[in-house]
Image: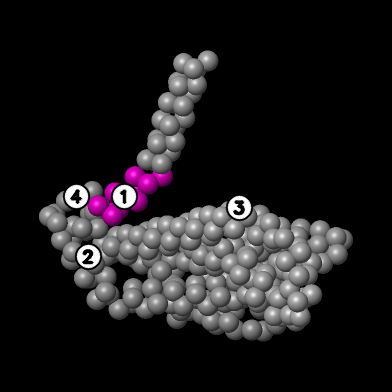
C-alpha cells in the first residue's frame, strides 16, 4: 500500500507540474521575448528594455490602456456595490424568492457572451440609444455583477446569523449593523468579487466591440483592429508581460489577505 501511495503521489505531481508548465510556458515565453526588440517573435536580438520604452511612447496604445482601465475599474465598482447588496438582499429573502433570484443570477455566468452582447445591442437599438460609455458600462456590469454575487454569497452562508441580531439588540440600526457587522465579515468575498470583475472587464472583447462608440478603443479592440492591417507591434509583448505581472501580484496579495483573515478568525474561535 505504501509503494502504491508513493507512486500515485509521484504521478499526481508529474501531472500537476505538466499542466502548470503547459499553462504558463506561453506566457513565460512572451515575457522572455519582451526583453528584446526583434519584431519577429522567436528571434533574439540582444537584451533590451526598448519595447517597454516604445510602449509608453505609443500614444494610441496608451489611450487604449487608459480606456481599458477606466471601464474596468468603473464597472468593477458598480458591479461590486450591486452584487454585494444583491447577495445580502437575497440571503435575507424568503425561500421562494431566493431560489428564483439565485437561478436568474447564474444565467450571465453560463450564458454565451455573444448572446449577452447581441441582446443588449438590440435593447439599446430599440430604445434609440446611441452607443457610448454608458452603454459599454451597462454591458460590463451585466457581465460581472453575477460573479460578485457568487463570491459574496458563500461568505454570507459562513456568517453567524446571531451576530446581526446581537448588533440590533445592542441598539444598532439596521444600516449600522450592515456597515459595522456584515460587510466587515464578508469583506474577503467582496474583494475577491472586485478583483474578478476587473479581470473579466480587462479580458472582454465581444461586449466591448458591440456596445462601444467607434472612437473608444480598449486593448482588445485596438489589437483586433491593427491585426487586420499589419502584424501586432512588438511593444504589445511588453504590455502583456506587465499585465501578467500586475495580475499575479494582485492574486498573491488577495491570497495573503484571505489567509491572514482566515487565521485571524480561527484564532478568535479558539
Q: Position of residue 229 (x, y in %)?
A: 34, 65
Q: Nearer the viewer, mark 3 or mark 2?
A: 3
Residue 240 visible in the displayed image:
no
Distance between the alpha carbons at the discs numbered 3 and 2: 53 Å
Q: Nearer the viewer, residue 33 or 158?
A: 158
Q: Position of residue 220 (x, y in %)?
A: 43, 66
* Residue 270 numbered tag: 3
Looking at the image, which residue is at 18% across and 57% down?
Answer: 36
Label 3: element kind:
loop
Q: Nearer the viewer, mark 2 or mark 1?
A: 1
Looking at the image, which residue is at 28% across and 62% down?
Answer: 238
- Asked if residue 270 is among those painted magenta in the image, a careful observer would answer no
* Range of residues picked out in magenta: 23-32
Looking at the image, which residue is at 37% across and 78% down?
Answer: 63
Q: Position of residue 206 (x, y in %)?
A: 54, 64
Looking at the image, which residue is at 85% across and 60% down?
Answer: 95
Label 2: element kind:
helix
Residue at numbered disc 2: 51
* Residue 43 numbered tag: 4
Q: First in sequence: mark 4 or mark 3? A: 4
Distance between the alpha carbons at the discs numbered 3 and 1: 43 Å
Please rate how many residues cluster around mark 2, counting C-alpha atoms within 10 Å: few if below 14, some from 14 to 19, many from 20: many
Residue 214 visible in the displayed image:
yes
Residue at numbered disc 1: 28
Q: Nearer the viewer, residue 178 or 193?
A: 178
Distance between the alpha carbons at the discs numbered 4 and 2: 14 Å
Secondary structure predominantly adopted by residues drawn in magenta:
helix
Please rate how many residues cluster around mark 1, counting C-alpha atoms within 10 Å: few if below 14, some from 14 to 19, many from 20: some
Amino acid at each position: 500500500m505504501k509503494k502504491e501511495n508513493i507512486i500515485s503521489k509521484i504521478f499526481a505531481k508529474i501531472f500537476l507540474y505538466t499542466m502548470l508548465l503547459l499553462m504558463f510556458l506561453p506566457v513565460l515565453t512572451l515575457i522572455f521575448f519582451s526583453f528584446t526588440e526583434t519584431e519577429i517573435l522567436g528571434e533574439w536580438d540582444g537584451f533590451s528594455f526598448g519595447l517597454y520604452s516604445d510602449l509608453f511612447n505609443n500614444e494610441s496604445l496608451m489611450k487604449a490602456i487608459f480606456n481599458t482601465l477606466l471601464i474596468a475599474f468603473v464597472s468593477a465598482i458598480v458591479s461590486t456595490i450591486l452584487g454585494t447588496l444583491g447577495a445580502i438582499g437575497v440571503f435575507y429573502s424568503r425561500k421562494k424568492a431566493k431560489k428564483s433570484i439565485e437561478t436568474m443570477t447564474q444565467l450571465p455566468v453560463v450564458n454565451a457572451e455573444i448572446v449577452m452582447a447581441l441582446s443588449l445591442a438590440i435593447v439599446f437599438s430599440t430604445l434609440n440609444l446611441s452607443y457610448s460609455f454608458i452603454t459599454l458600462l451597462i454591458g460590463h456590469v451585466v457581465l460581472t455583477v453575477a460573479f460578485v454575487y457568487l463570491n459574496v454569497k458563500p461568505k454570507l452562508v459562513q456568517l453567524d446569523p446571531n451576530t446581526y441580531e446581537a448588533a440590533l439588540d445592542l441598539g444598532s440600526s439596521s444600516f449600522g449593523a450592515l456597515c459595522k457587522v456584515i460587510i466587515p465579515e464578508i469583506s474577503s468575498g467582496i474583494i475577491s468579487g472586485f478583483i474578478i470583475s476587473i479581470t473579466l472587464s480587462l479580458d472582454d472583447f465581444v461586449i466591448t466591440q458591440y456596445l462601444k462608440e467607434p472612437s473608444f478603443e480598449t486593448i482588445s479592440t485596438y489589437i483586433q483592429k491593427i491585426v487586420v492591417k499589419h502584424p501586432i507591434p512588438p511593444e504589445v509583448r511588453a504590455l502583456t508581460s506587465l499585465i501578467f505581472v500586475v495580475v499575479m501580484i494582485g492574486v498573491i496579495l488577495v491570497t495573503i489577505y484571505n489567509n491572514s483573515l482566515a487565521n485571524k478568525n480561527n484564532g478568535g474561535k479558539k
